[in-house]
Image (cartoon, rainbow, N blue to C red):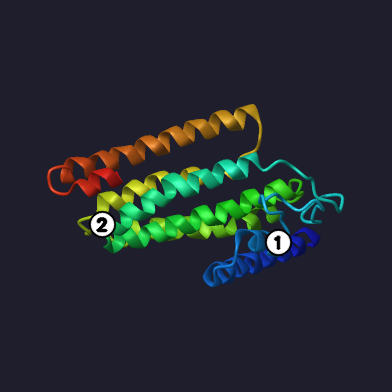
Amino acid sequence: MAELQSLQALIKRLETATTRLEELATSGTSAVAVASSLGRDSSGNQPTEPSNILSGNGTATETKSVSLDAYDELIEGPLNNFIELSKSIGGVVQDQSHSVEGIFKAQRDFIFISTQSTKPKTPETLVELFRPTQQALEKVCAYTENNRISPFYNHLITVSEGIGVLRWVTFEETAEMEEKLLSQVKGLIESSQYYAHRVIKEFKDKDRSHADWA
């Protein structure tokens, strides 16, 4: 119960921070001011005092945010490119892409929390922490199920077949589970690529933007 309460408090803080960022960005506030408002220095480093969030002993573990930096590069590069290409196609493809973006944002929160805390002691806490990602995953897949007669069905299923790789954060860190995870990721990617090749085959001579998207 205490862990769930701590989790709810952290989620509230994340929501507040996001809202504050949006307000500052809209007002044209400088990067230094934005960093200060979130308790970071001008280089974007984490606060020097750890937060008491989800840790088993009442203190959080300070860790380097290498994983978070790498994840941000993924968002700022390939993901943003995907969003823009989806926008150029429009319709349900663009709509689904917004939900994909939501998944990546939810998982970023998950990874951020993992850099600020120790592993939750109860599986219920982990389930609650993953819930925003799970809900966004379900929404992405719903676009595919609800648009089977769409001329862009292959686009939609390309995404829904591969997006499950983002469940990787729920796997235990053991050699056996890592091998199982890699096998599942490989299968999901191959399935996604199968439908992506269909998109390319159908549109390569009609509209190059679809092939670029795939």
Q: Looking at the image, how many numbered discs can be counted on the residues?
A: 2
Q: Is residue 207 above or below residue 67?
A: below
Q: Is residue 77 left or right of residue 30?
A: left
Q: In this view, does 173 lie to the left or right of 163?
A: right
Q: Is residue 96 above or below residue 183?
A: below
The residue under the point 31% across, 52% down is 85
Amino acid at the residue labelled 2: Ile
Q: Is residue 170 visible?
A: no
The dot on residue 204 is: none
Quick one: label 2 or label 1, which is nearer the N terminus?
1
- Please name whichever residue, 136 or 65, is drawn nearer the observer in this view of the structure: 65
Q: Where is residue 49 in the image (x, y as percent from the top left)?
A: 82, 53
Amino acid at the residue labelled 1: Ser
Q: Is residue 116 above or below residue 10?
A: above
Q: Is residue 70 visible?
A: yes
Q: In which quarter of the image is residue 132?
A: bottom right
Which residue in the rendered view is the most extreme toward the left? 205
Q: Position of residue 48 (x, y in %)?
A: 80, 51
Quadrant into which the N terminus falls: bottom right
Q: Where is residue 70 in the image (x, y as percent from the top left)?
A: 56, 41
Badge 2 vs badge 1, beta-carbon distance below 8 Å: no
The residue under the point 35% across, 38% down is 191
Question: Mark 2 highlights which residue?
Answer: 89
Question: Mark 1 highlights which residue?
Answer: 36
Quadrant into which the C terminus falls: top left
Q: Quadrant of residue 168?
A: top right
Q: What element carries label 1?
A: helix
